[in-house]
Image (cartoon, rainbow, N blue to C red):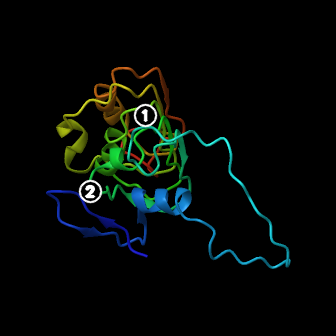
Amino acid sequence: MEGIKNRPGKRKRRNTFGGKSFTEALKEKYCTLMDNYNCTSGFIIDIVLTGMPKKTNSDAELDFLRNVVLSCKGVSCAGLPHGGLSSLCPNVVDLDLSSNLLDDWEESLTIMSQLPCLKFVNLSRNILINKENFLQKWQKPLPQIENLVLNQTGVPWEDIVTLSHHIPSLRELHICDNAGKKFGSSPV
Protein backbone atom coordinates (compact mmCIF):
# COMPACT_ATOMS: atom_id res chain seq x y z
CA MET A 1 0.00 0.00 0.00
CA GLU A 2 1.34 3.42 -0.83
CA GLY A 3 0.77 6.38 1.49
CA ILE A 4 -0.25 9.59 -0.20
CA LYS A 5 0.44 13.06 1.07
CA ASN A 6 -2.64 15.07 0.25
CA ARG A 7 -3.12 18.54 1.67
CA PRO A 8 -4.76 21.60 0.19
CA GLY A 9 -2.24 23.61 -1.79
CA LYS A 10 0.25 20.75 -1.92
CA ARG A 11 0.75 18.29 -4.71
CA LYS A 12 0.42 14.61 -3.93
CA ARG A 13 3.59 12.74 -3.11
CA ARG A 14 3.78 8.99 -3.15
CA ASN A 15 5.75 7.46 -0.34
CA THR A 16 8.31 5.08 -1.76
CA PHE A 17 8.59 3.17 1.52
CA GLY A 18 5.05 1.85 1.32
CA GLY A 19 3.88 3.68 4.45
CA LYS A 20 0.41 4.95 5.16
CA SER A 21 -0.99 8.26 6.26
CA PHE A 22 -1.89 9.13 9.84
CA THR A 23 -5.54 9.27 8.78
CA GLU A 24 -5.40 5.83 7.14
CA ALA A 25 -3.77 4.26 10.21
CA LEU A 26 -6.22 5.99 12.56
CA LYS A 27 -9.27 4.81 10.63
CA GLU A 28 -7.80 1.32 10.20
CA LYS A 29 -7.34 0.93 13.94
CA TYR A 30 -10.30 2.81 15.38
CA CYS A 31 -12.99 2.64 12.66
CA THR A 32 -12.66 -0.81 11.11
CA LEU A 33 -15.14 -3.29 12.48
CA MET A 34 -14.20 -6.94 12.54
CA ASP A 35 -16.67 -7.87 9.78
CA ASN A 36 -14.18 -10.13 8.06
CA TYR A 37 -12.90 -11.74 11.24
CA ASN A 38 -12.30 -15.45 10.73
CA CYS A 39 -12.83 -17.55 13.81
CA THR A 40 -10.79 -20.74 13.60
CA SER A 41 -12.01 -22.26 16.87
CA GLY A 42 -15.64 -22.59 15.75
CA PHE A 43 -16.95 -20.45 18.63
CA ILE A 44 -18.72 -17.17 18.07
CA ILE A 45 -18.18 -14.56 20.74
CA ASP A 46 -20.36 -11.45 20.95
CA ILE A 47 -18.42 -8.45 22.16
CA VAL A 48 -20.36 -5.50 23.49
CA LEU A 49 -18.54 -2.21 23.93
CA THR A 50 -19.65 -0.15 26.91
CA GLY A 51 -18.34 2.93 28.58
CA MET A 52 -17.72 4.79 25.34
CA PRO A 53 -18.36 8.50 25.97
CA LYS A 54 -21.66 9.81 24.69
CA LYS A 55 -21.64 11.73 21.47
CA THR A 56 -21.08 15.44 21.88
CA ASN A 57 -22.42 18.10 19.58
CA SER A 58 -19.48 17.35 17.31
CA ASP A 59 -19.98 15.61 13.98
CA ALA A 60 -16.45 14.21 14.15
CA GLU A 61 -16.40 10.47 13.53
CA LEU A 62 -13.91 9.76 16.32
CA ASP A 63 -14.74 12.58 18.73
CA PHE A 64 -14.71 10.10 21.64
CA LEU A 65 -10.98 9.37 21.22
CA ARG A 66 -8.70 10.88 23.87
CA ASN A 67 -5.73 8.51 23.64
CA VAL A 68 -4.44 7.40 20.24
CA VAL A 69 -1.76 4.73 19.97
CA LEU A 70 -0.49 4.16 16.43
CA SER A 71 2.90 2.72 17.33
CA CYS A 72 4.45 0.51 14.61
CA LYS A 73 1.64 1.18 12.11
CA GLY A 74 3.78 2.34 9.17
CA VAL A 75 2.69 6.00 9.38
CA SER A 76 4.80 8.07 7.01
CA CYS A 77 2.72 11.21 6.38
CA ALA A 78 -0.21 13.24 7.70
CA GLY A 79 -2.73 12.61 4.89
CA LEU A 80 -5.28 14.96 6.41
CA PRO A 81 -8.98 14.60 5.64
CA HIS A 82 -10.73 17.46 3.82
CA GLY A 83 -11.85 19.19 7.04
CA GLY A 84 -8.57 18.55 8.86
CA LEU A 85 -8.21 16.33 11.91
CA SER A 86 -10.81 18.41 13.76
CA SER A 87 -13.37 16.80 11.48
CA LEU A 88 -12.16 13.34 12.50
CA CYS A 89 -10.68 13.28 16.03
CA PRO A 90 -10.68 16.74 17.65
CA ASN A 91 -10.36 15.60 21.28
CA VAL A 92 -7.10 13.64 21.22
CA VAL A 93 -4.98 14.44 24.29
CA ASP A 94 -2.30 11.71 24.12
CA LEU A 95 -0.71 10.63 20.84
CA ASP A 96 1.80 7.80 20.41
CA LEU A 97 3.37 7.69 16.95
CA SER A 98 6.51 5.85 18.03
CA SER A 99 8.29 3.42 15.69
CA ASN A 100 6.74 4.62 12.45
CA LEU A 101 8.13 5.93 9.15
CA LEU A 102 7.88 9.66 9.84
CA ASP A 103 11.09 11.18 8.54
CA ASP A 104 10.62 14.93 8.60
CA TRP A 105 9.21 17.65 10.82
CA GLU A 106 6.68 18.87 8.25
CA GLU A 107 4.52 15.77 8.58
CA SER A 108 4.92 15.50 12.36
CA LEU A 109 4.13 19.16 13.06
CA THR A 110 1.20 19.09 10.66
CA ILE A 111 -0.39 16.26 12.66
CA MET A 112 0.42 17.91 16.00
CA SER A 113 -0.97 21.31 14.95
CA GLN A 114 -4.28 19.76 13.85
CA LEU A 115 -5.07 18.36 17.31
CA PRO A 116 -6.11 21.30 19.54
CA CYS A 117 -6.36 19.27 22.79
CA LEU A 118 -3.03 17.47 22.36
CA LYS A 119 -0.84 17.52 25.49
CA PHE A 120 1.42 14.45 25.11
CA VAL A 121 3.26 13.33 21.96
CA ASN A 122 5.59 10.35 21.53
CA LEU A 123 7.62 10.41 18.30
CA SER A 124 10.33 7.99 19.47
CA ARG A 125 12.13 5.87 16.88
CA ASN A 126 11.14 8.04 13.90
CA ILE A 127 14.25 9.50 12.26
CA LEU A 128 13.18 13.16 12.07
CA ILE A 129 15.12 15.42 9.73
CA ASN A 130 14.78 19.18 9.49
CA LYS A 131 14.44 19.18 5.70
CA GLU A 132 14.97 22.57 4.08
CA ASN A 133 15.10 24.19 7.56
CA PHE A 134 11.40 23.53 8.03
CA LEU A 135 11.55 24.10 11.81
CA GLN A 136 12.94 27.60 11.30
CA LYS A 137 10.14 28.42 8.82
CA TRP A 138 7.30 26.94 10.92
CA GLN A 139 5.05 29.77 12.12
CA LYS A 140 2.28 28.08 14.09
CA PRO A 141 2.90 27.70 17.85
CA LEU A 142 1.85 24.54 19.66
CA PRO A 143 0.86 26.07 23.03
CA GLN A 144 -1.13 23.11 24.33
CA ILE A 145 1.67 20.49 24.21
CA GLU A 146 3.24 19.80 27.60
CA ASN A 147 5.12 16.51 27.10
CA LEU A 148 7.23 15.50 24.11
CA VAL A 149 9.18 12.27 23.67
CA LEU A 150 11.90 12.30 21.01
CA ASN A 151 13.97 9.27 22.03
CA GLN A 152 16.00 7.71 19.20
CA THR A 153 14.87 10.28 16.63
CA GLY A 154 18.31 11.56 15.67
CA VAL A 155 17.21 15.14 16.29
CA PRO A 156 20.26 17.38 16.80
CA TRP A 157 20.38 19.78 19.74
CA GLU A 158 19.98 22.84 17.47
CA ASP A 159 16.64 21.52 16.20
CA ILE A 160 15.44 20.77 19.72
CA VAL A 161 16.17 24.36 20.76
CA THR A 162 14.33 25.68 17.68
CA LEU A 163 11.39 23.36 18.32
CA SER A 164 11.15 24.45 21.96
CA HIS A 165 10.40 28.01 20.82
CA HIS A 166 7.21 26.69 19.19
CA ILE A 167 6.09 24.80 22.31
CA PRO A 168 5.88 27.41 25.11
CA SER A 169 4.03 25.10 27.56
CA LEU A 170 6.59 22.29 27.30
CA ARG A 171 7.11 20.79 30.76
CA GLU A 172 8.74 17.44 29.93
CA LEU A 173 11.10 16.62 27.10
CA HIS A 174 12.60 13.15 26.59
CA ILE A 175 15.57 13.05 24.20
CA CYS A 176 17.48 9.88 25.07
CA ASP A 177 19.73 8.06 22.61
CA ASN A 178 19.92 10.71 19.89
CA ALA A 179 23.71 10.82 19.68
CA GLY A 180 26.24 9.72 17.15
CA LYS A 181 26.77 9.45 13.46
CA LYS A 182 23.92 6.98 13.08
CA PHE A 183 21.21 9.59 13.67
CA GLY A 184 22.17 13.25 13.59
CA SER A 185 24.90 15.76 13.05
CA SER A 186 25.41 16.70 16.68
CA PRO A 187 25.03 14.51 19.76
CA VAL A 188 22.23 15.07 22.24
Please state which of residues 9 and 13 is positioned toward the viewer in this rendering.
9
Question: Which amino acid is tagged 2?
Answer: His
Q: Which amino acid does label 1 sit on?
A: Leu
Q: Residue at x 29, y 28 (%)?
A: 166
127 versus 18 height, above or below:
above
x 54%, y 56%: residue: 30
Quadrant of res 82:
bottom left
* Residue that appears at 42% across and 65% down: 20
Residues packed near mark 1 inside 10 Å, few (<14), some (14 to 19) or many (20 plus): many
Q: Which of 148 and 53 is in front in this view?
A: 53
Instruction: Check residue 118 in the rendering and tell me which mark sits there, or answer none.
Output: 1
Q: Position of residue 181 (x, y in %)?
A: 44, 49
Q: How far apart are marks 2 and 1 (CA)?
A: 20 Å
Residue 58 percent across, percent down from the top left: 39, 41
> What SS does tag 2 mark?
loop
Image quarter where the C terminus lies is top left
Q: SS at mark 1? A: loop
- Residue 184 left/right relative to 52: left
- Residue at numbered disc 2: 82
Q: Of the two numbered discs 2 and 1 on the same chain, state the one appearing first in sequence.
A: 2
- Foreground mark, 2 or 1, reads 2
